[in-house]
Image (spheres, grey):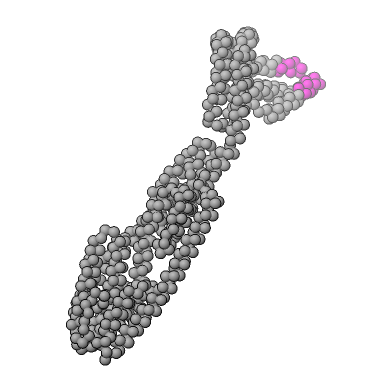
Amino acid sequence: MHENTPAVNPAEVPATTPAAAPAAAAEETAAIETVAPGIDPEEAAEDEMTAAIEGEEAADEADALRRELTAAEVLEAARAVLAKDAADISADDVRRLRQHFGAFHTVSETGEGVEAQGPMEEEFKSLLSQIREKKAMHTARIEAEQLAALEKKRAIVAEIEALAADTDNVNRTFPRYRELQDEFNATGDVPPTEDTAIWKAFQEAREHYSDNLKINKELRDYDFKKNLDSKQLLLAEAESLVAEEDVILAYRRLQELHNKWRQIGPVAKEVREEIWDKFKTFSAEVNKRYQAYFEARKAREAENEAGKAALCERLEAIDIAAIKTFGGWDKATAEVLAIQQEWRKYGFASKKANKALFNRFRGLCDAFFAAKAEYFRSTRDEQARNLARKTALAERAEALRESTDWKAATDELVALQKEWKTIGAVAKKHSDAVWQRFLAACDHFFERKKQATSGTRRAEQDNLKAKREVIAELDKISADTPRDEALARLRELQTRWQEIGHVPFRDKDKVYDAYRTAVDRLRDGLNLRERGARMERFSDNLSGLGDDRQKLSRERERLARALEGRRSELRTYENNLGFLSFKSKSGDSMLKEFERKAERLRADIAELEEKIRLIDAR
């Protein structure tokens, strides 16, 4: 009942049948309880409303946290929250302040985060403490008021029950019954855990009074009609909420409609079920859209969580220890900054994972930029030392740029160039300048040398041509050439070779090897012919000795001593060859010369052994 309900003369209230009304009221009560089977309707509504508010504010919060806030702005926001009325301060206000305060530690591109100053952090903590204390006092006051309201409503219910039991004084108690209903509706909220129970008790007491007492039928019909009009208004509004685009707003408003529906008294039994079914259908549509909204939000949070985890894995895959150059750090920094840009595109992940992911991501960024800063600090002194060394080399090259001692200056400049390659990097702002200085000095010297030695190169080319002609003449001496003529021609060509001057350095070893090959070929051929002649003469001498065993014995001893001497000399050469290791072309030529001498010794040994066998065969 409401205060604007017209007054009725209790004397006009007729008797009614007690059984019909309670049954109808009980059906409406049962219908209301089917909003969420097995769940307290009031608690379910409160939980869903809280979740909706958190969802909406989480979206707002995601946008807010993407903005860059300074510590001073966060402190100003905290002061603004503290200035609010305690009833307007929510737990989300405090949580957002804490998240904002942590968010401005975001890593910068230089690797240095924006850290809170000591006094600001202390003030922030003090403000949070004052906000919590203010909210706690308000909460305690609200709880006390709710407990008082609960006791008052219990007293009202008890009084209605007492009125319902006093069937003899209906004319006197009905106005009081109406006052009690208004007092119940006007009384403030009770503890959420008791709200459903006290409302059920109130509803049962009203139904008991309405259905079981001898109330004027006209008065009851009027009350039913007024309640039906009120519920139809709520029904129309519930129907409009089905098309409301703002799902959160629709859900909040639906909870308010349910609260109002419960406060309105019963309607006539014949329309009670129909009107409740319509209200319940519209409520189900709104709840269905609300549930779909949060399922979609949950899917988005899962996508955000997977995306942020993937970005963390990309950061973890960067091998910081393997970056050893400035170019490498520049490339890695560009990659990290690109990952940070991608991170900003993602919204919130699930509540249980979002903070852990952010801490993981920020820790990886901090570690990267700290390592980069340490690398630059550690290499700064090394770059200074490298610059000093390269500057010294450039100064030495400049001192040699006008030198005319071509060989000595060339050797030193080549050594300086080799040393330059062993020196590490220097700062970019000095690198090009010192290199151009060093390069200019070297280029100047070698250009002067090129101009000064151009005549020498022509002479070396002529000498190369002459030596190749000597080799061609050596190749013309064949095995058919008489021995004396071949020896004379060989000596003549060897003399010509010695008289020819230097050849280009790059051709020196090649032309010398060709010369040695031709000379060795001729010597080997002449030696074979010489050995054959010697063996014939030795055989003729043995025939002249006849059977003189004493002379044969002395000749064998002489040959045996000569054989042992050759063998000893050969062992010495072979032993020395085992220790020689020449890597240059000139060293390789010396090695080949030793091998040729060893080969001649082996030929001498073979000849001596053959002579001894001829003596032993006689």
Residue pushed farthest right? 550
Query: Residue placed at 59% from the left, 23% from the top?
Result: 394
| Depth order, front residue of 363/176 | 176
Q: Quadrant of residue 139?
A: bottom left
**Closer-to-camera residue (48/448):** 48
Q: Position of residue 299 (x, y in %)?
A: 35, 58
Q: Nearer the viewer, residue 85 or 68?
A: 85
| Quarter in which the C terminus is drawn | top right
Magenta stretch prevailing secondary structure: helix
Q: Residue furthest bottom?
A: 168
Q: Is residue 10 above or below residue 561?
A: below
Q: Is residue 165 above or below residue 363?
A: below
Label total for image: 0
Residue 56 at least partly seen: yes
Q: What residue is drawn where x is 32% and y is 77%? A: 183
Locate residue 259, reporting x and y percent.
Answer: 30, 71
Does any portion of residue 281 appear in the rendered image?
Answer: no
The part of the chain drawn in magenta is 538-562
Residue drawn at point x = 70 percent, y = 24 percent: 605
66 magenta-colored: no
Q: Nearer the viewer, residue 444 or 157?
A: 157
Residue 346 is situated, as x and y percent measured from the top left of the image, at: 39, 51
Determine if the magenta segment contains residue 544. Answer: yes
Residue 4 location (% of width, % of height): 24, 74
Q: Residue at x 33, y 84 (%)?
A: 159
Q: Quadrant of the N terminus?
A: bottom left
Q: Residue 584's image quarter?
A: top right
Q: Is residue 269 left or right of residue 564?
A: left
**558 lies left or right of 229:** right
Question: In this image, 304 relative to 498: left or right?
Answer: left
